[in-house]
Image (tube, rainbow, N blue to C red):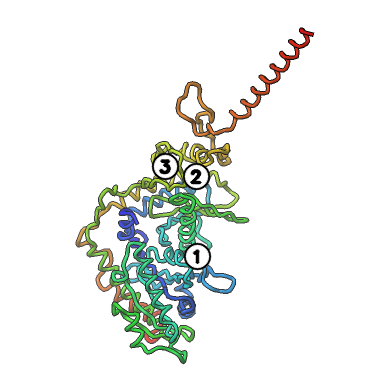
Amino acid sequence: MAQINLGRKEVSCKIVYYGPGLSGKTTNLEKVYEKTPEDNKGRMTSIATEGDRTLFFDYMPLDIGTISGMHTKFQLYTVPGQTYYKSTRKLVLQGADGVIFVADSGTDKIEENAQSLADLRDNLAENGLTLEEMPFVIQYNKRDLPDVLDIAILEEKLNEGKVPHFTASAVTGEGVIPTLKGLSRIVLDNLNKTSSQRPARPKPAGAQAAPAQPAKPAPAAQRQAVQPAKTPASQRPAHLAAPAKPALAAKRNVGTPARPAAPPKGVKKPVRPAAGRPPGATARPARSARPVAVPEKKNMTWIYVSAGAAAAALVAALLL
Amino acid sequence: MSNIEKELVQNRLVFYENDIEKINKVLQAFITLSEAKCAMLIDKEGHMVTNAGQEAQFDTDTISALAAGSFAATKEMAKVLGEDEFSVLFHQGKVDNIQLTLIGDRCLLAVVFDERTTIGMVRLYAKEAATRLMEIFKVVEKREPSADEKLLKDGFSNDAGNKMDDLFGEDA
């Protein structure tokens, strides 16, 4: 979601290049980077594998300058196209203000394009959005190759919503900037519309207004220990908030004695109850799992056996 | 996705001058107490809200995007462990270190520091700063813009389009 910062007079929008693997998303970004004047771009960052395939995302900040007194920036991201990086794509897609779908025009790629488009819909849905409400354009890339489908066929198969489309050859740079310009305009139009005509914020049933720390949902079956009522971090006094949470740490290590995390250097250790069971306490303390009972029992048995044997020996000696 | 999460997705944060002044004061106090080099407030989408401390020697936009990405990735790790998310991340370097602290639901405090201070000092004062920042965010998140409020001037997108034409050329 774009950030409008009236304090710093800045508008910052996030644009994501989406599409199947090897359709040319990173090449698009590289060409935008090449064509952007030095003063208007930051560093291009690629989190890629050794083989130069996108692992997490490629990123470049694009500064288009001051417009109506607002410094306007675009953050351009690509997603990894390979099928098994679906969850990574979902992360990159979070908070996107617009999506450019880079389709491979190859005759044998129509199925991959359709799958990637379905994946985009899924990932948007998981983020609570639909493709219809998202500023969206399609780029039919690799038009320079010999075996490409007609635009009419691609449109019929992929462009269900009849969104604006662009033809491109990212390798040569053709069509790259028009695609970006096309989407940017829609994103900024949408920004203005939603800024000025944003409907009143819905109040979801049961939702608290802007909680500082939302109540944690009951953690799944992994944690079965009963959690004591926890004071939210925001309400805890600062001097108690600094060190690690010993009770929680001990609880997670039920069965193995937990070593409370040492407070960081320079921080006064807060006073807290001793870890063992306090005298007269009925509730089970967090660290009661300390394995002390079993060895004690063994020791007592050994004493009883030894005492019995000694008594028997004494009786035998007396009888003799 | 919970109702609260949906609401967060659908509502953008708008920071007014007064908000930024208040946030800057908190960050400045944090820098003085912790002796960190610089502090950046970043939203979870990777946009920087504001910063304080030494003039950054690095690309703050890139750091913001990567910090948000790093946080998002470790959130998935946390989920695997049965946590909602990790509230503090720490990256240690030979000279400079970065600590990321979650602020409420929408923002991160990224602190860059070196050997002039310790992780303990940074963590302690970052906790205090986080509490104060969350108070400010409660107001920012709850605020309802009036129906006729225009944050951006009419023709903003047209002007932006023209600006991009100037930047890349008409036919690019």
Q: Residues within 10 Å of mark 1 (few under 14, many from 20)?
A: few
Camera-near label (1 vs 2) is 1
Q: Position of residue B126 (x, y in %)?
A: 47, 47
Q: Position of residue A267 (x, y in %)?
A: 54, 38
Quarter of the image for the N terminus of chain A: give it.
bottom left
Q: Amino acid at mark 2?
A: Leu
- Do we see residue A258 in this rendering? no
Q: CA distance from mark 2 to mark 3?
A: 20 Å
Q: Earlier in the sequence, mark 1 or mark 2?
A: 2
Q: Residue furthest left?
A: B148
Is B65 in front, or is B150? B65
- Which residue corresponds to mark 1? B59
Q: Quadrant of residue A235?
A: top left
Q: Amino acid at mark 1?
A: Asp
Q: Is residue A18 left or right of residue B18?
A: right
* Above or below B27: residue A151: below
Q: Quadrant of residue A191?
A: bottom left
Q: Quadrant of residue A155?
A: bottom left
Q: Position of residue A24 (x, y in %)?
A: 47, 79
Camera-near label (2 vs 3) is 3
Residue at screen point 53% across, 48% down: B35
Residue at screen point 39% across, 68% down: A14
Helix, strand or loop status at disc 3: helix
Q: Is residue B31 left or right of residue B19?
A: right
Residue at screen point 33% across, 77% down: B161
- Which residue corresponds to mark 3? A233
Disc 1 with disc 2 on a shared chain: yes
Q: Residues within 10 Å of mark 3 (few under 14, many from 20)?
A: some
- Which residue corresponds to mark 2? B33
Helix, strand or loop status at disc 1: loop
Is A183 in front, or is A10? A183
Chain letter of mark 1 equals: B
